[in-house]
Image (tube, rainbow, N blue to C red):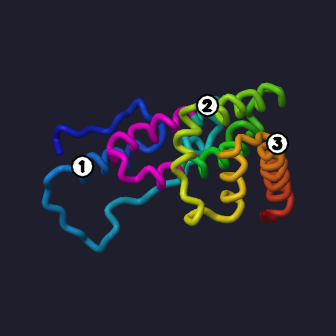
Amino acid sequence: IKHHVFDESLKIGEDRIFNMQLFQQDLRITYLNRNGYYYRQNDNSATKKYLPNAFEIYMKYIDQMSTIACGKHDADLGNEVLFKFDECLATDYFHTDNPNKFSKKIAQIKKIFYSKRFQAHISNCTSAKLPTFLQLSLFFIQKKIFLWMYIRIFMKISNNTFKRIFGVSFF
């Protein structure tokens, strides 16, 4: 255990990577049915606030997880990348604190959408494990039909506005 430390250069997932590295060791582990720590939600945490490069930070985490998993969980990691990409549309690229113009935001999304790195992860997705809306997104992303992203962006922005006004989501 003493040779493993949190990778503090990561802003997301450092605890999960630490645990995955630890579980690969030849250790005796005991399960205790009790709370060992409490997870506090903080509005200033990396997972809550606007980060201009949030998806890139997340991809560094995915790359490390992929290395640790040695190809054993590519489908799960691919699904996780798809989920986070979809989530980042509203929470990062179209976050209210993002100062960029619409055209710049779209350019950032297109750069990721068409990148070999992103497409490689997406090619590993298993649609059977995805909710319906992400199955549809997966289809269009794998076919490299960017028009779908405009639709998803509109849906995400509309849903956030609706939720802010009425306190509930409509999709």
Q: Position of residue 67 (x, y in %)?
A: 35, 40
Q: Position of residue 109 (x, y in %)?
A: 71, 34
> Which portion, as a residue range, is magenta?
56-78
Disc 1: which residue:
22
Specify whether 139 is left or right of 76. Answer: right
| In the image, farthest residue toward the bottom | 33
User: The disc labelled 2 sits on which kind of residue?
Assistant: Ser
Give the position of the N terminus as an image quadrant: top left
Tell me the crowding category of disc 2: few under 14, some 14 to 19, or many 20 or more residues within 10 angstroms, Cα based: few
Whether residue 68 is in magenta: the answer is: yes
Residue depicted at x 72% and y 57%: 136
Specify whether 25 is left or right of 90. Answer: left
**Sooner in the amino-acid sequence: mark 2 or mark 1:** 1
Viewer-nearest residue: 57 or 49: 57
Mark whose residue sits in front, 2 or 1:
2
In the image, which disc is placed on residue 147? 3
Whether residue 67 is in magenta: the answer is: yes
**Tag 2 secondary structure:** loop
**Sooner in the amino-acid sequence: mark 3 or mark 2:** 2
Residue depicted at x 81% and y 48%: 157
- How far, Cα to Cα, is label 3 from label 1? 43 Å
Tell me the crowding category of disc 1: few under 14, some 14 to 19, or many 20 or more residues within 10 angstroms, Cα based: some
Residue depicted at x 31% and y 50%: 20
User: The disc labelled 3 sits on which kind of residue?
Assistant: Leu
Q: Main secondary structure of the magenta part?
A: helix
Disc 2: which residue:
115
Residue depicted at x 43% and y 37%: 63
Res 127 → quadrant: bottom right
